[in-house]
Image: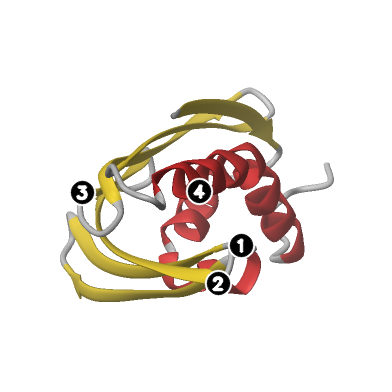
Amino acid sequence: MRFEDARTLVADCERLYAMVADIERYPDFLPGWEDARVLARTEEAMEVVQTVRAGPMPVRFRTRALTRPPRGLDIQGSDGPFRRLHIAWRFRPAEDGCRIELRVEVEARLGPLAHLIERLFRHQARELLDHFERRAHRLGLIRSD
């Protein structure tokens, strides 16, 4: 499953990047996210364990987030239910704020949950930028010029 979305927000790219890179806050505003903990952090990367609910079942997985402030964040995983998980965030200054580009690629391992997991992530991907935009509003990151 692949999905791409983009939009321009009247906001500072550095502040939007910091909001997206604050992975431990994801359960506060992303439906289905039950837990996100940074296990290790360096200047270039974070090792994260996350739990997302897939129907009645929690799905736990590890990811490595490669950080490139304030230009991008690449979240990659290949354990748990995923043969491949890649979430790429890009932040580019625009005339009226910051252009955010999102690309999500998910391939679940074969098994009884593969279809459910890919369907969950397809649904999440379609609404991901909406959730982050609402959070940016709540945090006062979007200017009302």
Which residue is under mark 3? Answer: 78
Which residue is under mark 4? Answer: 116
List x then y, in percent, for residue 76: 26, 46
Q: Mark 1 is on which residue type?
A: Leu
Q: Mark 4 is on which residue type?
A: Leu
Q: Earlier in the sequence, mark 4 or mark 2?
A: 2
List x then y, in percent, for residue 64: 22, 56
Taking the spot 63% from the left edge, 52% from the top edge, the residue there is: 132
Q: CA distance from mark 4 to mark 3?
A: 17 Å
- Front residue of 29/98: it is 29
Q: Secondary structure at mark 3?
A: loop
Taking the spot 38% from the left edge, 51% from the top edge, the residue there is: 112
Which residue is under mark 2? Answer: 27
Which residue is under mark 1? Answer: 30
Q: How packed is label 2: few (under 14 Cα within 10 Å), some, or many (20 or more)?
A: some
Q: Secondary structure at mark 1?
A: loop
Q: Secondary structure at mark 4?
A: helix
Q: CA distance from mark 4 to mark 2?
A: 20 Å
Q: CA distance from mark 3 to mark 1?
A: 21 Å
Q: CA distance from mark 4 to mark 1?
A: 18 Å
Q: Nearer the viewer, mark 4 or mark 1?
A: 4
